[in-house]
Image: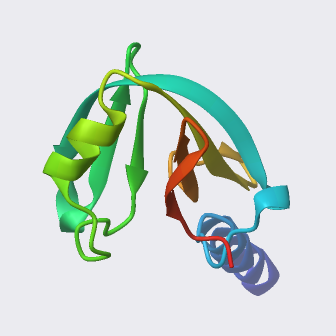
């Protein structure tokens, strides 16, 4: 029973740690092109980008990082953007590691 409990604890730890996005790199991302039709403020000062379907993507704590909703609306709204989205163990994240519009990098976490 103790070994089974340890296995479950380690499995849960692995699952949660695989969802943490730390220092994303371009080679660890999926590149996706979408048209942005709405930009909103999310929880924890996130900036949320909505596509013309049902998907959404976010810049984690974007408002704390100096991004501005009015400026983003001018540069990004109703335009096709290129997003770099980190790959996770269970799929692709909606977390934006890089956002590019017309060869202009609006936001990046790449170093």
In the image, taking residue 53 as reference, residue 84 lies left or right, namely right
Across and down, in percent, residue 89 comes to 76, 54
Viewer-nearest residue: 98 or 5: 98
Q: Nearer the viewer, residue 67 or 2?
A: 67
Report whether 20 appears left or right of 53. right
Task: Quarter of the image for the N terminus: give it.
Answer: bottom right
Task: Name which residue lies at 38% across and 64% down.
Answer: 60
Whether residue 85 is situated above or below residue 76 in the rendered picture: below
Q: Which x, y percent locates residue 21? A: 60, 70
* Image quarter (top left, top right, bottom left or bottom right) of the C terminus: bottom right
Q: Is residue 42 above or below residue 74?
A: below
Q: Nearer the viewer, residue 69 or 95?
A: 69
- Residue drawn at point x = 73 percent, y = 79 percent: 10
Judge left or right: residue 38 versus residue 89: left
Give the residue at x 31% y 65%. 62
Residue 56 in percent (x, y) is at 39, 34
Count of numbered labels shown in the rendering? 0
97 relative position to 70: left or right: right
For residue 3, which quarter of the picture?
A: bottom right
Q: Percent x, y for residue 93? A: 58, 48
């Amino acid at each position: 029973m103790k070994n089974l409990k340890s296995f479950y604890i380690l499995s849960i730890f692995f699952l949660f740690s695989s969802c943490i996005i730390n220092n994303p790199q371009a080679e660890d991302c999926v590149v996706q092109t979408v048209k942005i039709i709405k930009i909103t403020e999310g929880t924890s000062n996130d900036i949320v980008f909505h596509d013309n379907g049902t998907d959404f993507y976010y810049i984690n704590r974007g408002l704390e990082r100096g991004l501005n909703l009015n400026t983003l609306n001018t540069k990004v709204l109703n335009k096709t953007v290129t997003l770099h989205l980190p790959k996770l163990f269970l799929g692709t994240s909606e977390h934006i590691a890089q956002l590019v519009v017309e060869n202009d990098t609006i936001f990046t976490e790449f170093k």
